[in-house]
Image: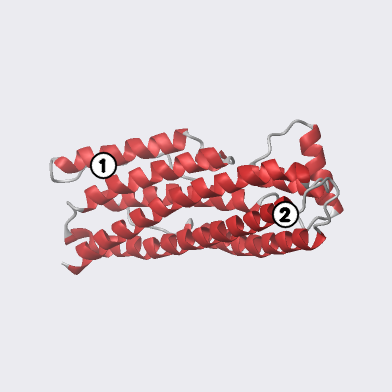
Amino acid sequence: MVSSNKIAYSISLPTRPTLTLTVEEQLCQLRSSGLATSSSSSSISSNLVSLKNLYESVDALLQLQSTQQEKNLDSILDGSVMLLDVCSTARDVLSQMRECVQDLQSSIRRRRGEDLDLAKELDAYMTSRKKVTKVIRKCLGGLKKMQCRNYDDVTVVNVLKEVEAATLVIFQSLLSFLSGPKQSNWSLVSRLMLIKRVACGAELNEVERVEVALNAKKIVDAQKPLLALEMSIQDLEEGLESVFRALIKTRVSLLNILNH
């Protein structure tokens, strides 16, 4: 989880404490939004926007950074590569999910009526979901390893460490949302778990709503949740794309510092 420790402001230039304070304030706002508990697409999209803004402030801070902490910044640079890899993987996952959802929607529209025989299309959807979930689980495992990395307690590096930790939590929330409930492919246990959650009035996210509708074999009823999921994916894609660009910009700034 993201540390709640205060970040020191002992940076030499007058503008640096102000920039550091700005970054910490943005981090606090992200923490207060419930990083680890964000499960809806709207909250995750909002966090992605905040994360992009956070990295813009980080980049401004790095523009004033000297080469005195080169050794410490080098470890942050390694972390930036991993974050870019995770972000790229998440973008690919979103793209695959969007295409799969659109294909299923197209099949439903082409074949009107209550008794739609879309067994082949449903199998294709579930096969795609299974592949996506496998990629996500592997990616989540990589994120857990990143959280175990250690850094020297240096002011600017400590700021960047906090930013990295917040990024990891947001990426975990995003990937967990996309993977849906922890379940084996349409098993009886999975059905019972989803039915129980619905019966208890539990709030389901967009991915889960689609799975509930498809699991109930009421294909027509799946049209609405599929459309909602498609719109959510598009919002997440836009947010993730802006974060990806911000990550690249931050990495370039780090490289510039280390190469001077």
Q: Residues within 10 Å of mark 2 (few under 14, many from 20)?
A: few
Q: Look at the numbered disc 1 and give the secondary structure of its residue.
A: helix
Q: Judge from the rendering whether residue 110 lies leftward or rightward of residue 143; answer left or right.
A: right
Q: Quadrant of the C terminus?
A: bottom left
Q: Residue at x 35, y 38 (%)?
A: 26
Disc 2/disc 1 C-alpha distance (Å): 55 Å
Q: Residue at x 67, y 55 (%)?
A: 106
Give the camera-side residue of 238 and 250: 238
For residue 44, say whether it is visible. yes
* Amino acid at the residue labelled 1: Thr
* Amino acid at the residue labelled 2: Arg
- Would you name the residue on which mark 2 appears? 110
Q: Look at the numbered disc 2 and give the secondary structure of its residue.
A: helix
Measured as percent of width and height from the top left, residue 168 is found at: 47, 52
Q: Which mark is residue 20?
A: 1
Measured as percent of width and height from the top left, residue 74 is found at: 30, 65
Q: Residues within 10 Å of mark 1 (few under 14, many from 20)?
A: many
